Image (cartoon, rainbow, N blue to C red):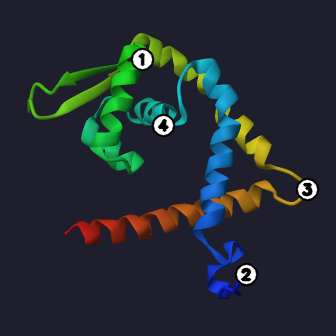
Amino acid sequence: MEEISPELHLGNQLCFPLYATSRLTTKIYAPYLNRLGITYPQYLVMLALWQYGELSVKEIGERLYLESNTLTPLLKRLEQKALIVRERSKLDERTVVISLTSSGIKMKGQAVEIPKRIVESFNDQTLDGEELAVFQKTLFKLLKVLDGRVSKAKE
């Protein structure tokens, strides 16, 4: 086989470990979320609603970096599970407002231990809590940079 440039080696790609880590992290969440009967993207929506309360579809999309065409089916499924309610805003009928049902609020109590369990699964002899905190901070910086680039590209 022809030798490829080092730039094309998997080990030299920034995005590959991000992608693989994301996939594996989502797998670690699976048993906890299966108990709640929701998927990881649905969990993210619930996190946003638990934190902020009532949000418009647009606001949820902005907080989760999701497009409306991805978010709408997700919200429909959460509504079918009786965890959220989707209603037109009384101030602007073009805006759909999402709020939690009593079941959605109750689920928060069941989910409160999940973040702790996930962080525990990341800790081992080679990685400690401080490194995870620095990594998370770096990822949020990268997220902001990339979001800015994508936003400029849309203009």
Residue 38's place in the image compared with 69, above or below, is above
Give, as a three-letter code, the residue at label 3: Gln
Question: Contact, CB < 8 Å: mark 2 with mark 1?
Answer: no
Question: Label 2 belongs to which residue?
Answer: 1
What residue is drawn where x is 53% and y is 30%? 39
User: Disc 4, disc 2: CB below 8 Å?
Assistant: no
Point out the tag, 1 or 4, that comes first from the N-terminus: 4
Q: Quadrant of the N terminus?
A: bottom right
Q: Position of residue 90 (x, y in %)?
A: 10, 25
Circle 4 Cα neighbour tier, 10 Å, few/some/many (<14 / 14–19 / ≥20): some
Q: Amino acid at mark 4?
A: Pro
**Disc 2 vs disc 1: which is toward the camera?**
2
Cα distance between the residues tagged 1 and 3: 39 Å
Q: Nearer the viewer, residue 98 or 67?
A: 67
Give the Cα distance between marks 2 and 3.
38 Å
Alpha carbon separation for disc pair 3 and 4: 30 Å
Reading the image, the residue beneath label 4 is 41
Q: Residue at x 68, y 72 (%)?
A: 10
Which residue is pictured at 64% across the width and 19% down the height?
Answer: 35
- Looking at the rendering, in which quadrant would you find the C terminus? bottom left
Label 3: which secondary element: loop
Q: Which residue is mark 3?
A: 125
Q: What kind of residue is marked 2?
A: Met
Q: Earlier in the sequence, mark 3 or mark 4?
A: 4
The disc labelled 1 sits on which kind of residue?
A: Leu
Instruction: Name the N-terminal-most of marks 2 and 3.
Output: 2
| Distance (Cα) linking label 1 and label 4 | 14 Å
The answer to whether residue 144 is left or right of residue 6 is left
